[in-house]
Amino acid sequence: MLDQLNELQMLKYFEIENTVIAELTDEKFIISQPQDILDLIGDSVSYNCSRLMIREQNLHTDFFRLNTGLAGEILQKFSNYNFKLAVIGDFSKYKNKSLQDFIRESNKGRSIFFVNTREDALNKMIRK
């Protein structure tokens, strides 16, 4: 089992079923550009980790406006680096049909998930 990193770190790493998972624990950190994700991915690779859990509030509001392109740019990084991502939050409040379709289609795949609970996120992260 991996030890948790000290509280100054933004990511907490742990291992479940031989799978290392990173969880963004800094509630104030906002992912507002693709480089922010690349930094998190880079940190995770050094722990032999290819799975990341974040919360909805860690994503800039532009992420949820698909016409900004931010969601596509950020999620493309996960595809490029063969990472899984689980975003935890309440997505029912977003009434935009395109966004709801985007979330639904993402959840049909094997690498990007929008889930309601941390438990759901963990289940998606350990699924092969």
Image (cartoon, rainbow, N blue to C red):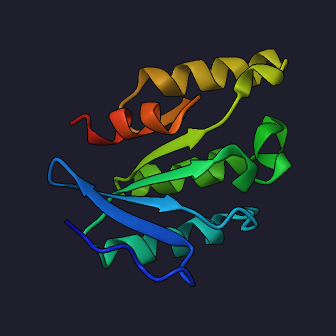
Name the residue: 48% across, 58% down. Answer: 23
The N terminus sits in image quarter: bottom left
Name the residue: 66% across, 35% down. Answer: 89
Q: Is residue 57 left or right of residue 67?
A: left
The C terminus sits in image quarter: top left
**Pick the front one: 7 or 45:** 7
Q: Is residue 68 left or right of residue 45?
A: right
Q: Position of residue 30 (x, y in %)?
A: 75, 63
Q: Quadrant of residue 13?
A: bottom left
Q: Establish if 69 lies above or below 96.
A: below
Q: Establish if 13 lies above or below 108.
A: below
**Pick the front one: 101 or 11:** 11
Q: Is residue 83 left or right of residue 55?
A: left
Q: Position of residue 41 (x, y in %)?
A: 45, 68
Q: Is residue 39 left or right of residue 48?
A: right
Specify the farthest residue to the left: 18
Q: Position of residue 126 (x, y in %)?
A: 27, 40
**Number of marks in picture:** 0
Name the residue: 54% across, 32% down. Answer: 117
Q: Establish if 5 lies above or below 44.
A: below
Q: Position of residue 61 (x, y in %)?
A: 84, 47
